[in-house]
Amino acid sequence: MKILLFEILYLIFSALLVALAFINQGIAPLLLLVYVIATAGLLLYGRYMVRLQKKNETELNKGRIISLMNAINSFVVIWSEDGSMFLMNDKLRNVLKPETLQMTGEDMLTVLFPQGFQNHGKSAMMLSAVKEFSLDSKFGNIFINWTSSVLFRGTDETDRIIISIGFDVTENKIIRQQLNITNNLLATSEKHYSMAMNLSEIGIILNEHCDEVFHISKELRNMLGIGSDTIKVDDFIALIHKDERMMFESYLKSARANSLRVDHTNSMDLRIRSYDGKYRWYAFRYKNSQNGQYGMPVIGGAIIDISKDKEKDNLIERMAYIDEVTGIYNRNKLVINGSEIYECCKILELSYWVIVFDIDNFHIINDTCGYAKGNQMLKEFSDILYKKKGRNGFAARVGGDNFALIIQDYGDPNFPIVISQEIQEEIANIGREHDFKQNISCSAGYSRMPADGEDFITVFERAEFALSTGDKKRSMVMFDSRVHDSILTAAALERSLAEAIDKGELALFYQPKISLKTRRIMGVEALIRWIKPDGTVISPDYFVPVAENSHLITRIGEFVMDEACRQNKLWQNMGFPPIVMSINLTSEDFYQKDVKQYISEKLMETGLSPEWLEIELTESLAMKDIDFAVSQMQELRDIGLKLAMDDFGTGYSSLSYIQKMPITLLKLDKSFITLLEDDNVAREIVSAVIKIAKSKRINTIAEGVETEGQLAILEELGCDYIQGFLFEKPMCAADLTEYLRTH
């Protein structure tokens, strides 16, 4: 644009000079000189402007080229062989040392491409192929692969502009070097490994893709006589003995689910069939691991022939796990195998029955026929169980005449009963064959695993518990969690009750007995209560039955006797009119002690006179052994005690024995008193009992009186005393003390 403007101005200037020369010819020479000088000046200026424009265009193109070079994410150099041109991008500039950046283009080429420039032309060498050179960068020595091509050709073969693009291959070169080292080490290690495998006779079985094929090592192929380096998983399982097959299948399922313990080596002993058809013992050792490439679990491990070791272990195992009398497994082996079956049940979602047997009254066989016959009986019974255990079952003698049988559950809930009945029939036949003097039978208790416990021991103990709940010969009882829980609750209650006695949490409450003639208190009945630290009062109906089934009832009886006698004497010492203290005597105290001496000692210790103590006995207690009961009663009467018959009229033999018993008081049961107002039969029974008692000079007392109507009827029938909520409820000693003050 500037050149065009310059040309236009030059034409205008020339035209003006020509016009002036024609107008004034006298100055024409001078104008010609001016024209020549101006033309020369303008030509020089024009040449300068052209060069300036070319320089600007060159700089602009150079800037564009450098921008393009910086856009390439590699090292880029544009250069000429004579060194007249050298451009590089920022990526290359950023890795060069500062002193390198100070070099000229030609010198820098020898740094970037340090080999071959002496004997070959630079461009000829760089254009021949991809070249790798090392570069001493500010980050250390790096390796660059350079690829070059001609960007511009001049007239001369050496007058060319070259572009070279370099790629940093330092990391790849290091990795290749490491791989070479690793490959060499692996080759050496594989050689050593192969030699070790051959020497140690360890076979390997692997599955890395969760498919249905095992890859097996040369050593294992030789051990088992397998012709291929692979074998189907199912075919390998078929080689395992049926007794260990389920255990291996459980391992497979756990391994495929990746649920084995991490970093823990496991082992199992397997019998595997070899090429000769014989089973040999192998130790299979495995560990949870994953295929790093595919992220799948690696299934398999090492297999070692331990047949010789097993032979040595047989004697030890026989001593530890075989029952000497029967020849079958003992309790120790039952626990081990049962635990393994339990784990398989959980993994493979199977179910098994655990049945525990007891030969009924087996001690009689030993006593009457001798121990040799008894041992023969045990041996033949174990043979029966061994036949019944089935393919995947297990039989063992637990101890004494107790045996256990583990059999698979195929969905029939009556299967244990069917098996037990078959065993009962066979043992009965054995008894007849040997001409035993008694009928031979057995009882069974059974449970199911894993449903009935968190481990095998628990399931087994629950089968034993079920056996213990059978109440007769030939019983077959399934474990019932409700019965089990109720017994556990009773046991827990027994422990709590024992602690309560030790801590003094038991207390006596007293319910007044009222004379119908005087309407005054004539005595009290001592009633046991359990008062917890938080003030909760527990009824004796809840804890006394538990105490009666243990030794605790004796301790409770002693507490009641001591406290009742002490309290009654205390009231007398306080100046209150004497009243009769009634306490209930337990069956254990009444039948298993010298009751006369026992009570006499308590009276002496407290200072209470015998006439103010009344012993209450239940009708059922007295009827247990009527002759002994009468004898015990008479001894108590001889020392001056009063005797009351509790719950009279609820039994079947009461009236026939009433004249034999030296009682002083009959207690009419609450069940009759409740019906007095509405039931004529109940009224007649109460009337008859009162009349009989009066004929024997025995006083009567009605318990559970709650209404005025009941009171009126009893008064009309001639009852002597009453006891019930109509007058007073049971109260503690302090409240009764206040009651005595006001009444």
Image: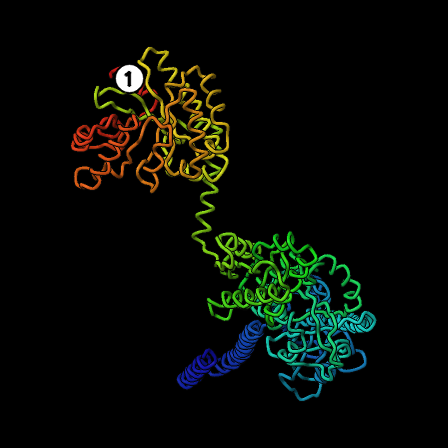
Kindly identify the amino acid type of the residue bearing the numbered disc 1. Answer: Leu
Classify mark 1: helix, strand or loop.
helix
Q: Is residue 171 above or below residue 454?
A: below
The answer, for residue 111, to whether it is visible in the render is: no
Q: Quadrant of residue 546?
A: top left
Q: Nearer the viewer, residue 266 or 264?
A: 266
**How is the rendered protein coloured?**
rainbow
The relative height of residue 272 versus residue 469 in the rendered view (above or below) is below
Q: Which residue is mark 1?
A: 740
Seen in the picture, residue 524 relative to 267 is either above or below; the reply is: above
Nearest the eye: 370 or 468: 370
Whether residue 420 is visible, yes or no, is yes
In the image, taking residue 686 as reference, residue 363 lies left or right, namely right
Image x and y of residue 565, in percent: 41, 20
Q: Residue, x 31% and y 25% (percent of image)?
A: 731
Q: Position of residue 90 (x, y in %)?
A: 60, 68
The location of residue 200, given as percent across then percent down, is 81, 69
The quadrant in which the C terminus is found is top left
